[in-house]
Image: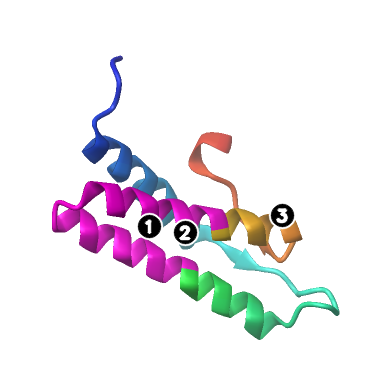
């Protein structure tokens, strides 16, 4: 298969991230992290995904890709901290 177009790349990132949001579970946060603060970061990530969808519809694919990438970065950071559980579709 050849290289993906920017539109296909954005669609793939959005699809994978939507899957994570449908399955994400917030764990009990360690003493140093408050659950409410974890939820704020999860919601920020969700807004980046919403932004990506918007920019994609507007044809601003570079911005759409950047937005969904920020979303994925926040989700990965939360997972590395051990305060959420999920797996990316390709990890299954």
Q: Residue at x 30, y 44 (%)?
A: 10
Secondary structure mostly taken by the magenta-highlighted segment of the chain: helix
Query: In the rendered image, which residue does mark 1 sit on?
Result: 67
State the separation of the CA atoms marked 2 and 1. Answer: 6 Å
Question: Percent from the top left, x then y, of residue 8?
Answer: 25, 36
Query: In the rendered image, which residue does mark 3 sit on?
Result: 80
Question: Percent from the top left, x then y, of residue 60?
Answer: 19, 52
Location of the N terminus (image quadrant): top left
Residue 12 horizontal side relative to residue 56, left or right? right
Q: Residue at x 55, y 54 (%)?
A: 73
Highlighted range, magenta: 45-73
Q: Visible in this render: residue 92?
A: no
Question: Percent from the top left, x then y, of residue 37?
Answer: 65, 81
Q: Residues within 10 Å of mark 1 (few under 14, many from 20)?
A: many
State the separation of the CA atoms marked 3 and 1. Answer: 20 Å
Q: Between 74 and 26, which is closer to the camera in this rendering?
A: 74
User: Height in image: 82 above or below 40?
Assistant: above
Specify whether residue 48 is painted magenta.
Answer: yes
Decide: marks 2, 1 in contact (CB < 8 A)? yes
State the separation of the CA atoms marked 2 and 3. Answer: 14 Å
Residue 90 horizontal side relative to residue 82, left or right? left
Specify whether residue 62 is painted magenta.
Answer: yes
């Amino acid at each position: 298969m050849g290289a993906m177009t920017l539109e296909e790349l954005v669609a793939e990132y959005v699809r994978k991230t939507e899957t994570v949001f449908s399955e994400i579970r917030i764990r009990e946060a360690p003493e140093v992290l408050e659950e409410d603060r974890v939820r704020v970061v999860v919601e920020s990530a969700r807004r980046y995904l919403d932004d990506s969808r918007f920019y994609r519809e507007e044809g601003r694919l570079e911005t759409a890709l950047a937005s969904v990438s920020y979303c994925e970065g926040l989700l990965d950071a939360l997972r590395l901290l051990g305060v959420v559980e999920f797996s990316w579709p390709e990890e299954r």
